[in-house]
Image: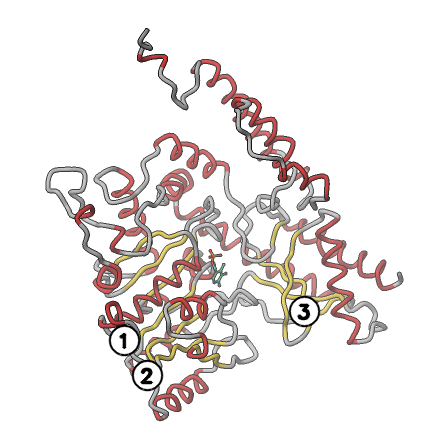
Amino acid sequence: MTKKSNDEPSLDPSDWDDFRKSGHKIFDDMVDDLAGLRQRTAWQPMDEDAVKPFKAPMPKKGAGLEGAYKDYVEQVKPYPLGLSHPRFWGWAGGAGTADGMIANMISAAFHSPNIIFQQASLYSEIQVLDWFKEIFGFPGDAAGILVSGGSMANFVGLNVARHAMAGEAIRKKGLDGTQYTVYGSTETHYCIPKALDVLGLGTNNFRKIPVDENFQIDVAALKAAIARDRKAGLTPIAISANAGTIKTGATDPLDELADLAELEDLWLHCDGAFGAMAILSDKYRHLVKGIERVNSLAFDLHKWLSQPYETGGILIQPGKWLEETFSYDASYVTKLPGALTDVPVVFSHRGIELSRGFRAFPFWFTAKAFGIEKFGEMITKNIEHAQYLKGLVDDAPELQRLAPVPMNVVNFRYIGNGDVPEDKLNDLNRAILVQVHRRGIAVPSYEDIGGKFAIRVCNLNHRTRRDDFDLLVKSVLEIGKELENA
Ligand SMILES: *Cc1c(COP(=O)(O)O)cnc(C)c1O
């Protein structure tokens, strides 16, 4: 007997009404979890028992939606990173939003990845990139693409720099032995030298220029390094500026670097992973003054814009360089007028990836829900809260601030009443931070500031309240005293 067509196997639910009921219950749990974040610990360590389920063999037969969800609830849900928690300030994490969660669900249902086809995802990404051009003061003929994050955005920017400055022959012939050099401060994120490594330029050709007491690049030292390299027969191609360094939130003098890049005929790249977004704050946009002049600007949406992971972006001016760097011809990507491939922008000609998710959607959606100004208000609040924490640290004799706080990053340590010898302070502060994490109080990260172990708060969290910093300081003081006397 031939099977009826509706008996053919598929991955769809066997009963859509049951699926809807289960889905509603799951959605209710998701909302409860988000609404109850403040009641949770900021982090939950995973012991041996917690890791055990992840060694189970692969499921050959299915347990259904309910069965899979049960495993999620028991094995995964109790152990999040904690990014969404009001007291997560580690590294450079964004907190996400409830509206962004909905955006991701809608996008999953829409299932319309932005590849090379005519569909709304394509126009939405073009539109979002136009918004960022406007936000950063880039001209209409600038070009961009959304990528997985800041590391990829910086890679794309430096690849374009190599192409624009060292010539297109490299794309076909590879490097010919010329030593191309790139300059950035000692505070530059490691994704920049890593990009030079992948691009074949070599990490040794990344020149680490010293910084001043504000952790901003020493422009005189930069000029001297460029001159020295030219004299030695090397070929400088780019300066990599910082808008908000990972360690202290410092921004290099962008206008001065733009003048220098023009004078020296160098490409000016900027890593603005989180800091570039300060431009949205009416009160603090001056911190990134000059950002509109850089040739390539890398930024993250999943950090200060609280977007779902993974989204970053890169803008290039003049825009023509982007497609010149990445275009490829192949029979299966040629445009067929009138058909699906009849598109104004082929994003695969602007980066490494071909198949890409609908990266623009969560921002497209949440920007409409909140309005761009709201993001600016959150950024202003985060910077002011960081200044508040700075004040708390400066007012506590048992604490010592280890770096200036130009934006939203605070580095400090516990010193007690001065009885702890300097060579014991790093271990003591390491131990304090471990306890702050393990007791689930808060998640600052740590930093090495001139050999001193700093407890580091990078405030990108729209959920944080002022009293969350009161609690952090109180806890560090208590734990410090407890461990000092142990
Ligand atoms: C986070 C960060 C990066 C890397 O971005 P990812 O999105 O994590 O890949 C690069 N530079 C700075 C300054 C950052 O804060």
Q: Nearer the viewer, mark 3 or mark 2?
A: 2
Q: Which residue corresponds to mark 3?
A: 401
Q: Residues under labels 3 and 2: Cα distance?
A: 40 Å
Q: Secondary structure at mark 2?
A: strand
Residue at (67, 75) in percent of width and height: 451
Disc 1 CB within 8 Å of nearest ligand 1 atom:
no
Relative placement, left or right, of 157 versus 37 is left
Corner quadrant of residue 243: bottom left
Task: Give how far across and how far down residue 334 sits, in percent.
Answer: 16, 48
Query: Closer to the N terminus: mark 3 or mark 2?
Result: 2
Query: Closer to the N terminus: mark 3 or mark 1?
Result: 1
Residue at (56, 50) in percent of width and height: 461
Relative placement, left or right, of 208 versus 147 is right
Q: Which residue corresponds to mark 1?
A: 166
Q: Is residue 364 above or below residue 218?
A: above
**Mark 3 is on which residue type?**
Arg
Residue at (78, 76) in percent of width and height: 422
Q: Which residue corresponds to mark 2?
A: 235
Q: Secondary structure at mark 3?
A: strand
Q: Residues under labels 2 and 1: Cα distance?
A: 9 Å
**Mark 2 is on which residue type?**
Thr
Q: Secondary structure at mark 1?
A: helix
Image quarter hosting the N terminus: top left
Q: Nearer the viewer, residue 130 or 76?
A: 76
Residue at (37, 52) in percent of width and height: 147
